[in-house]
């Protein structure tokens, strides 16, 4: 019953959003209603201002300001602000956020157990900035990131309280590196063809203000193929690896509402991971659509020790409701299965 209320409220709330999409410049404030196994029921507000260089509002706008304030029934608070700006062919991206986000820690490695679950309550302060320029068909440029993790509380007598887990008493991360992007998608929110590729390599060093030294790279490849009758096949591959004294908060994570739906967020963490997912999307008529998906991944202490013969697996199906046909923004309701569990997700925008 609560899911039905969420659908009705969200569709009603998004009507104001759709009315504002008739021009190339928008200033929209909308309520947010969502639910996931990691947050429970949540409410909040989103503010979006964007300017599109063309009437095709499904494409990436030329300038974006975004603001979000969210609160969940698990006492999680999120505040974030982001800005993206085109300077000719160059692009600047800035983001800052504040999170007070009670979570759970299960240990490190692919063999961590639910029986080892312990709670902790962190406060995260985050800032990132990037400047990309075109080069041989790519967008390339420097990336900077700063994060401060303050551990408000940890479970007494747990691993985080023992002093043996890096970051258990908090951490400061300050890193500088390189980012590379390719984006040929035909739509920003729900593409039917093209690719979206992101790679970044960051050096976190004490002389940058970091509390530890480590290197980290991330690769995210997404491909979309249009099939007959507006059906779409979407595939994503993610690879992440770190070397050095990395705090647990920054380790590669499997699970959540994006990759490996059906597994709790942060259920498996380690220095490295490989994960992939495939999703088949088909229209049902009118504003409705359906998806079927499967995902697999694994964490390890290094990429060469990832056990590809013993992957964590998840699969599921979902309903899609088009909230705005011009921007191709969808509401998604996913039911995912993994490790003898069933999880339900209610979110705006596709998982990838």
Image (tube, grey):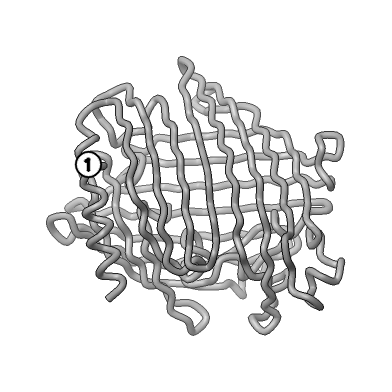
> Which residue is more in the foreground, 13 or 192?
13
Does residue 38 appear to the left or right of 173 in the view shown?
left
Identify which residue is drawn at 51% across, 24% down: 91
- Where is residue 143? Give x, y as percent: 65, 32
Identify which residue is drawn at 53% across, 47% down: 79
Q: Which residue is mark 1?
A: 18
Identify which residue is drawn at 41% across, 53% down: 44
Query: From the image, which quarter does the N terminus lie in?
Result: bottom left
Hey, which residue is sitting farthest top in the picture?
88
- Is any atom of residue 303 visible in this view? no
Question: Is 275 placed above or below 186 here?
Answer: below
- How packed is label 1: few (under 14 Cα within 10 Å), some, or many (20 or more)? some
> Which residue is more in the foreground, 278 or 166?
166
**Considering the numbered disc 1 on the image, is that residue within a helix, a strand or a loop?**
helix
- Where is residue 250? Give x, y as percent: 70, 54
**Quadrant of residue 51 in the image?**
top left
Hey, which residue is sitting farthest left in the picture?
286
- Where is residue 300? Give x, y as percent: 71, 65
Identify which residue is drawn at 61% across, 56% down: 100
- Where is residue 297? Give x, y as percent: 57, 65
Total numbered labels: 1
Does residue 70 appear to the left or right of 347 in the view shown?
right
Does residue 99 appear to the left or right of 211 in the view shown?
left
- Is any atom of residue 224 visible in this view? yes
Does residue 41 appear to the left or right of 250 in the view shown?
left
């Amino acid at each position: 019953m609560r899911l039905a209320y969420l659908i009705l409220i969200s569709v009603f709330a998004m009507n104001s959003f759709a009315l504002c999409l008739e021009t190339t410049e928008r200033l929209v404030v909308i309520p947010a209603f969502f639910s996931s196994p990691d947050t429970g029921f949540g409410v909040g507000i989103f503010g979006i201002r964007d300017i599109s260089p063309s009437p095709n509002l499904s494409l990436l706008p030329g300038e974006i300001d975004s603001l979000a304030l969210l609160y969940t029934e698990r006492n999680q608070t999120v505040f974030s602000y982001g800005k993206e700006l085109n300077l000719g062919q160059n692009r600047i991206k800035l983001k800052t956020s504040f999170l007070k986000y009670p979570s759970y820690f299960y240990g490190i490695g692919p063999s961590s157990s639910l029986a080892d679950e312990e709670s902790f309550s962190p406060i995260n302060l985050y800032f990132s900035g990037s400047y990309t320029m075109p080069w041989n068909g790519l967008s390339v440029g420097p990336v900077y990131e700063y994060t401060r993790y303050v551990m408000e509380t940890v479970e007494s007598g747990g691993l985080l309280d023992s002093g043996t887990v890096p970051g258990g008493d908090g951490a400061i991360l300050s890193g500088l590196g390189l980012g590379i992007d390719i984006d040929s998608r035909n739509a920003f929110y729900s593409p039917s063809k093209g690719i979206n590729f992101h790679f970044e390599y960051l050096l976190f060093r004490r002389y940058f203000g970091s509390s530890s030294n480590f290197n980290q790279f991330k690769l995210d490849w997404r491909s979309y193929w249009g099939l007959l009758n507006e059906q779409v096949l979407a595939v994503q591959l993610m690879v992440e690896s770190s070397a050095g004294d990395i705090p647990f908060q920054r380790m590669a994570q499997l699970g959540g509402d994006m990759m490996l739906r059906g597994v709790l967020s942060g259920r498996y963490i380690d220095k490295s991971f490989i994960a992939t997912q495939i999703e088949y999307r088909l229209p049902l008529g009118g504003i409705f659509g359906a998806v079927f998906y499967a995902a697999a991944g694994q964490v390890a202490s290094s990429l060469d020790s990832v056990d590809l013969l013993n992957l964590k697996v998840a699969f599921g199906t979902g309903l899609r409701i088009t909230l705005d046909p011009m921007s191709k923004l969808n509401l998604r309701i996913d039911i995912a299965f993994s490790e003898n569990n069933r999880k339900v997700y209610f979110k705006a925008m596709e998982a990838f």
